[in-house]
Amino acid sequence: MFTFAKKNSIPYLQAPVFAECNFLTHAFCTRQGGASRSDYKSLNMSFREGDEEFRVLQNWETLADAFAISLEQFLVLNQVHGADIIVIKQQGSYFSSRADLDYDATITNRPGLAICIKTADCAPVFIVDKVRKVIAAVHAGWRGTASGISAKVIRLMQKQYGSMPQHILAAIGPSIGKCCYEVDSAAAEAFAELKGKEDFLFPKTTKKKWMVDLPEANRRQLLDCGIPEQNIGLSGYCTMCHQNIFFSHRGSGGLTGRQINFIMIKETNPCLAVTLDHKVY
């Protein structure tokens, strides 16, 4: 289970599995500590959900100040509920416009770049090669999970960086849990193609309804890639069960904000996001 910490007004969760990685900064943030109001209260980090723009910007400034990371160091994907991955090189320019960021996972060995995942029920997955110092941030909704996005990231890290399974650590952050995540037959059929589905896909007595354990589905993908079980951490929190702590799209009926989750390789002289130079997979 993850542990709570706090910087200034920002409470966040940390994954004990990363405790040995002193080259990392990471945080699974909550909905608390920000300036947003009403359905978006309070640390809403998304401009897309209908919140007042100046409040979202204030929230980003509050986060940046708390962690002593400049706003230009945060890289946020558009998150299109797919399984495409963007790889950011260690050196060179990499960012030009938001239209270039229609992906659901980022891999990089670049210091000073805080790669982010926004969530409100989907699973944020952080993956770290502790030896080669490579990190990945994965947005694993049901479509991405059913497409094997976590496994795809592992395979790409092995191909691009020579990562070894025994050196890889992973943390699966707060998401909707098997207690609350009911899906229809169309979604269930997508999950049914995955290996070990009996561990995370459960039929209900209600006709054509299923319960899905989203964190476990991603954990199984990591295990099937050879990642040791002790190298994988789960948050232990369901976003729908704990709506006082986390935003939940399902729990709110669709009107809610997004919390941010980020991971970064530390550096003394941070890089700034200015132009795009990457590979897409």
Image (tube, helix red, strand yellow):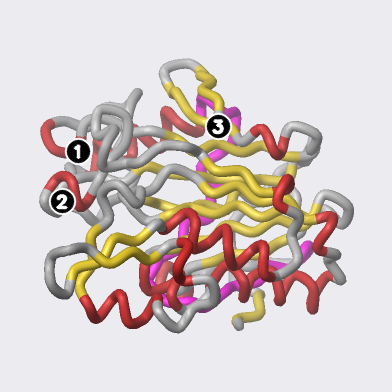
Between 239 and 217, the one nearer to me in the picture: 217
- Amino acid tagged 2: Gly
Between 207 and 232, the one nearer to me in the picture: 207
Q: Residue furthest top?
A: 8
Q: Report the Cα–Cα distance between label 2 and label 3.
A: 30 Å
Are the two marked residues, 2 and 3, in contact with CB atoms closer than 8 angstroms? no
Q: Which mark is residue 140?
A: none
Residue 63 horizontal/vertical position (percent): 46, 31
Between 142 and 101, the one nearer to me in the picture: 142
Q: Label 2 crowding class (10 Å Cα cut-off): few <14, some 14-19, many 20+?
A: few
- Amino acid tagged 3: Phe
- Mark 1 element type: helix
The residue under label 1 is: 40
Q: Nearer the viewer, mark 3 or mark 1?
A: 3
Q: Label 3 crowding class (10 Å Cα cut-off): few <14, some 14-19, many 20+?
A: many
Name the quadrant of the C terminus. Answer: bottom right
- Look at 70% across and 38% down and name the residue there: 17
Are the two marked residues, 1 and 2, in contact with CB atoms closer than 8 angstroms? yes
- Look at 61% across and 38% down and name the residue there: 26
Residues rendered magenta in the picture: 65-91
Q: Report the Cα–Cα distance between label 3 and label 1.
A: 24 Å
Is residue 91 found left or right of 120 in the rendered image? Answer: right
Are the two marked residues, 3 and 1, in contact with CB atoms closer than 8 angstroms? no
The residue under label 3 is: 2
Above or below, comparing residue 180 to residue 244 in the picture: below
